[in-house]
Amino acid sequence: MKGIQTSSFKYVVGWIVVFAFRLIPFRPPNVEPVMATLMPFSKRYTALESFLFAFFSIFLFDIITSGIGSWTWVTAFVYGFLGIASYYFFKNRSASRTNFVMFGIVGAILYDAATGLTIGPIFNGQPFMIALIGQIPFTLNHILGNIIFGAILSPLVYRWIVTNQKLEFNFIRNKLAAKSI
């Protein structure tokens, strides 16, 4: 967990990026930067740290905006497991636009299948076929959003936040200590 200890500020910045964008009014449903922010973090940090980043991206947003419900646990755990999958996907791959887009597409499909086809039918008694048909436009939005964010936002998050040594806790602490001397 050394990554979280030295990069806790980076996690907060990543969560703020996700949170702020998700608060934009009138954005299309399922067009959000959770996956695009998660992927760069999973390239640099461990599977557990990737799980925690993704899980808390959802969990913290729900605590502040809508409250905790059954949907929170399902979506937070599914994103958490996608964080682990992203870690293993990027373990031996570069942090390139192509790889971000590829994982973003597959991740959107897996996420929407696991959440959109379970929450309604299991928790609300929705017929499966209605959930499946209704999920199609949301999944298309999710894929399109992940393509755009994977191509533009993910490389920026990786370069400006994840690999930025100036955002490491040790660097910040040393700078503050140097100023107080």
Image (cartoon, rainbow, N blue to C red):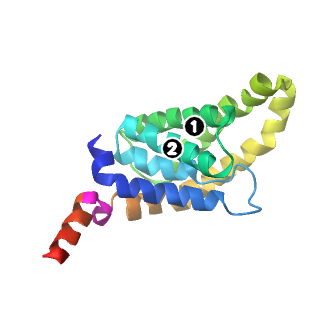
> Which sits in the foreground, 13 or 47?
13
Q: Is residue 110 left or right of residue 84?
A: right
Residue drawn at x 33%, y 46% is 4
Q: Residues within 10 Å of mark 1 (few under 14, many from 20)?
A: many
- With respect to residue 166, does 88 lie above or below? above
Q: What residue does disc 1 label?
A: 76
Residue drawn at x 42%, y 41% is 50
> Which sits in the foreground, 44 or 15?
15
Q: Position of residue 93 (x, y in %)?
A: 39, 43
> Which sits in the foreground, 131 or 139?
131
The amino acid type of the residue labelled 1 equals Ala
What residue span does the magenta drawing correspond to?
A: 164-169
Residue 56 bears which disc, if any? 2
Quarter holding the N terminus? top left
Q: Position of residue 122 (x, y in %)?
A: 75, 22
Q: Is residue 92 visible in the rendered structure shown here?
A: yes
Residue 81 lies in the magenta-colored region = no
| Element type where label 2 sits in the image | helix
